[in-house]
Image (cartoon, helix red, strand yellow):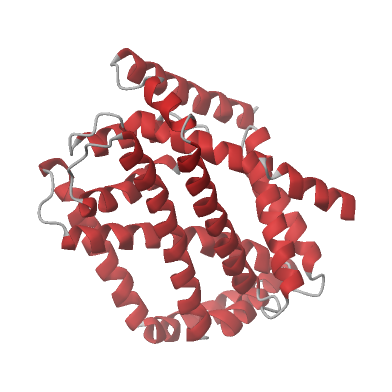
Amino acid sequence: MKPKIIFFIKCSISLLLIYWLVQKGELSMRNVKLGFSNLKLISIFMCLTFCQLFIGAVRTNLLMQFNTGSGFTLRRVLTITWASSFINCIAPSALFGEVFKVKELLTVDPALIKDNTFYTLGFSKIFSIISLIFITVAASLLAQSHPQGIEWSLDFLYIFIILIIFLYVIRNQIIYVLKPLFEKTYSLSNSQILRKRFDNFKQYHLIFLEKKKNFFRVILLSLLIQILNTVSFLVIIYTINTDIAQNILDLIYVIPLGIIAMTLPISISGLGVGHLAFSKLLGMFGIISGADIFTIYFAYSYIFNLIGLVPFLILQKNR
């Protein structure tokens, strides 16, 4: 019953927020129709989204510690990633897509440590959030002014980025302090399963986290993914609002905040929450079509993910 209750709550939140925005007149179909009638906009968005998908597959390849020189492995990861996005389209929860992705990635290299899949999913989400925050911080520092209602959020993000940088600088000291605690926990554990998890994490840490080259590659790839994601929104914004005179840096630093909001697990695929977030964030700069912009973005993304049916069928055929 618990998953059903959570799904019902998410649906209720999404529907209530969308209804509230429609009643306020902030959500209409005029801009949505304009977005779907623009084939050039659709083509640009699909190309940008595919680039994100491809770079994400390269990042997964690195995090999983596959043979990065194998083109076949990269194609397989790309196919699995796109197929899992299709599962997210037809399933009531993103968890189904994640489970499918984990299951399929384990078949790419049966000799690989299976725990690597969970580390990959976890680090992918962490690096994506940090990348969005970094884009916001960098663009906000270059912007001339900030709306009063968002200054406290930016101050918090500045502190967060400084903390992340500080923790990275003293990472060796942190490992030195935590190592005795790790070994103590390992020695006190009587469970072979738990000890196996410790051994796998230690091996993963030694192979990946201590290799600076791979570490910075993953950070760079994560930044590229989120930059392309931000550009996708910018393309829609400037297409719908042809007379916009707003400084592009202002939009660059608020778009990642909206992306973070729509990924919060309190609604169905960001519906409602994403509409509200972009309506408020873009509204600070006089753009009143924020909810419509998110609708177009969501619809385009949904169509792209539905095309994932093709790689999904390819995987089933190969099986």
Q: Position of residue 201 (x, y in %)?
A: 61, 74
Vertical placement of 146 versus 209: above or below? above
**Would you say 194 lies left or right of 170 here?**
right
* Res. 153 visible in picture: yes
Query: Which residue occupies the foreground of this view, 179 or 187?
Result: 179
Judge left or right: residue 140 versus residue 176.
left
| Residue 102 or residue 49, whichever sits in front | 49
Q: Where is residue 130 in the image (x, y as percent from the top left)?
A: 38, 62
Image quadrant assignment for residue 79: bottom right
Q: Which residue shows up at 53% across the image and 77% down it?
A: 182
Percent position of residue 294, x then y: 40, 35
Q: Residue at x 42, y 48 (%)?
A: 232
Position of the C terminus, as image quadrant, is: bottom right
Q: Where is residue 38 in the image (x, y as percent from the top left)?
A: 46, 34
Q: Is residue 251 left or right of residue 189?
A: left
Task: Examine the rendered structure and indicate whether residue 29 appears above or below residue 128.
Answer: above
Q: Can residue 91 be seen in this view?
A: no
- Comparing 250 with 168, the one in front is 250
Q: Given the current orientation, which residue lies at the most extreme top position?
A: 23
* Relative to 117, 154 lies left or right: left
Instruction: Quadrant for the N terminus, please.
Output: top right
User: Is residue 142 depicted above or below 85 in this figure?
Assistant: below
Q: Looking at the rendering, which quadrant does residue 237 occupy?
A: top left
Q: Residue at x 55, y 60 (%)?
A: 122
Total marks drawn? 0
Q: Which residue is drawn at 73% across and 77% down?
A: 70
